[in-house]
Amino acid sequence: MSGLDQKATAIGLVAAGLLVLLSAAEAQDFSPAKNRFGQPDFEGIWQVLDPAPHYDIEPHGARYGVPAGLGIIVDPADGRIPYTAAGLAKRDANRADLSADPIARCYKPGVPHIMYLPFPLQIVQSRNLVTINSEYVHNTRVIYLHRDDHFGEGEIDLWNGDSVGRFEGDSLVTDVFNFHPDVWLDRSGNHAGGPTLRVNERFTLIDPDTIRYEATLTDPENFTQPWTIRTYLYRHKDPSKRILEYECHAYAENSLGPPELPEAP
Amino acid sequence: MTSRAAIAVFIGVLSLLGSGLGSAQSVFRAAPPAGPPPEPGPVDRMPDGKPDLSGNWSIAVSVGDIAAHIVRIDGEPVEAVDRAIPYTPVYARLRDEAESRMYEEPELHCYMSGVPSHMWRQGYSGAGLIIQQTEDYIVFLHEFQGSRRIVPLAERERVPDSIRLFMGDGIGRWEGDTLVIETTNLTGITWLDTSGNRHSDRLVVTERFTPINNDAYSYEATFVDPEAYTAPWTIAAPMTRGGDPNAEILEFACIEGNTDHLHYTEEVGGPSRIGPDIR
């Protein structure tokens, strides 16, 4: 390892250490309200504030129609996805044909992308399930709390994966598995999907109106190491806020509307 | 391929998509509605004392013909032989033209089924209607089309008339133990069943969920739509809790796999209603 690399690594480790400390400091002082099942209460309408990760989760400068962003990858410290050669080749192929973007086709956005879409989402909790109801094409993620295993061994292709979860202290933690291979992470061709991907999420209220959202992605086929994103979901305070509809596929048809009425007989 | 055959293929594909995965899962099976009427009994309640509908349900309404469940027209009870939707002349003709307008069938386009017909699509997917309830909201989730309704249980302002929603703007309230949901701002796009019964975007649906015991509610829906109907009409059906409290709904990837609308060629009027292939 060269001196420069060592220095970069050391800076990276310090930065990672600071982030751990920072997240520990955020969580320490706050004890969230509990619902009738004794679960930390995540209910409400939430949304990320920064649209940039939806376009590109890595650090990037602005370009036409895309705001600049510092990226949301906190590990590795360089903020870049640690692709394998195969993973990188697929990223490059995606980037060469952005029309293949699932979002451009109104497809389901996948996990974790659904969490940082520029659409609000409403979290609702029951004894055995947590639902995350995004306004984007009525995508509802159901996180099942009554089981901790998945059906099958990755043979089932689900765009939003199969989510199981549990409460760990005041955090909701999930294990998401059984992904479709064509899921993208952003509008720039970054991807994570397929039978070998696991996404492990952690939702933590750091104050009554902010959820710290972290997701670690593990997939030896596409990534050289597990890597982690972190972003924040903010509570909508406007009491009139509600989840409306963005039925993308309906709007893509050229004549959406009530039927042409026949002549009266 | 005729439109009817195409629909059959489409439904077949949906069934595969919807329930093919279900074999590894606890799949909801609707309890048969036959048998003696349910005995009155206690119901689970929320901390605020209101009935708790959380869980898995089926409502015994035919996907194929909603008119078979009519119990009142203009507030008057009707006999079985008189069960017919009181259409205005234009909407009667629209319904009669259903066979030649199959390309307008919303499910063909992967649209959500609308209110209230998304409530009884278990025949397609094998999974039931999942209800989540809090003191502030009631949420209806169905595997078919992944349809979803989030209904507040407190008064709030309606969305403006210019906003039309596949699942409408529903607001719930309690009348004693009966949950009443009034839904406005619907589209004129969705159908009431698969045989082409229709409504306009002026439709207002009022649903009533009345507990009999913890596993049996009575369900009613009243349809008021001066453009499409000459009088209000009401359907009723038993609503039964599923046996498995952990029944699950799976992902319904309709948009991601839909090719059926491409079968609707110019001869059947398809392209006039269908836009570019978004895939």
Image (cartoon, helix red, strand yellow):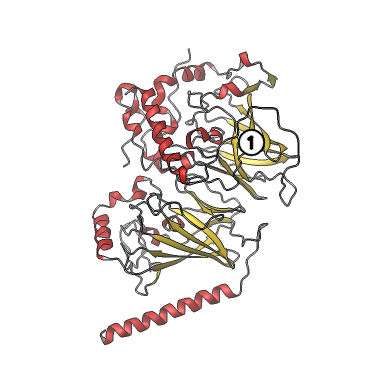
Question: Where residue B8 appears, x then y in whole percent?
Answer: 40, 27
Question: Label 1: how many residues lie within 10 Å, few (<14), some (14-19) or many (20+)?
Answer: many
Q: In which quarter of the image is the C terminus of chain B?
A: top left
Question: Where residue B48 appears, x then y in whole percent?
Answer: 74, 50
Q: In this view, does B186 lie above or below A143?
A: above
Q: How many labels does the image show?
A: 1
Query: In this orientation, which residue lies closer to the viewer: A131 or B204?
Result: A131
Which image quarter: residue A153?
A: bottom left
In the image, farthest residue toward the bottom: A3
Question: Where residue A130 appears, x then y in whole percent?
Answer: 56, 54
Q: In this view, does A112 lie above or below B108?
A: below
Say left or right for A209 vs A49: right
Query: In this orientation, which residue lies closer to the viewer: A122 or A110?
Result: A110
Query: In this orientation, which residue lies closer to the viewer: B193 or A219?
Result: A219
Label 1 sits on a secondary structure element that is strand
Using the rendered image of the protein, determine whether residue B164 is visible from the camera's viewpoint: no
Which image quarter: residue A238?
A: bottom right
Query: In this orientation, which residue lies closer to the viewer: B169 or A96?
Result: A96
- The amino acid type of the residue labelled 1 equals Thr
Residue at left 66%, top 27%?
A: B35
Q: Quadrant of the N terminus of chain B?
A: top left
Residue at left 61%, top 13%?
A: B81
Q: Name the residue under label 1.
A: B240
Using the rendered image of the protein, determine whether residue B147 is visible from the camera's viewpoint: yes
Say left or right for A18 vs B66: left
Say left or right for B87 vs B145: right
Question: Where residue B165 appears, x then y in whole percent?
Answer: 51, 39
Q: Is residue B62 above or below residue B159?
A: above
Which image quarter: residue B99?
A: top left
Q: Which chain carries label 1?
A: B
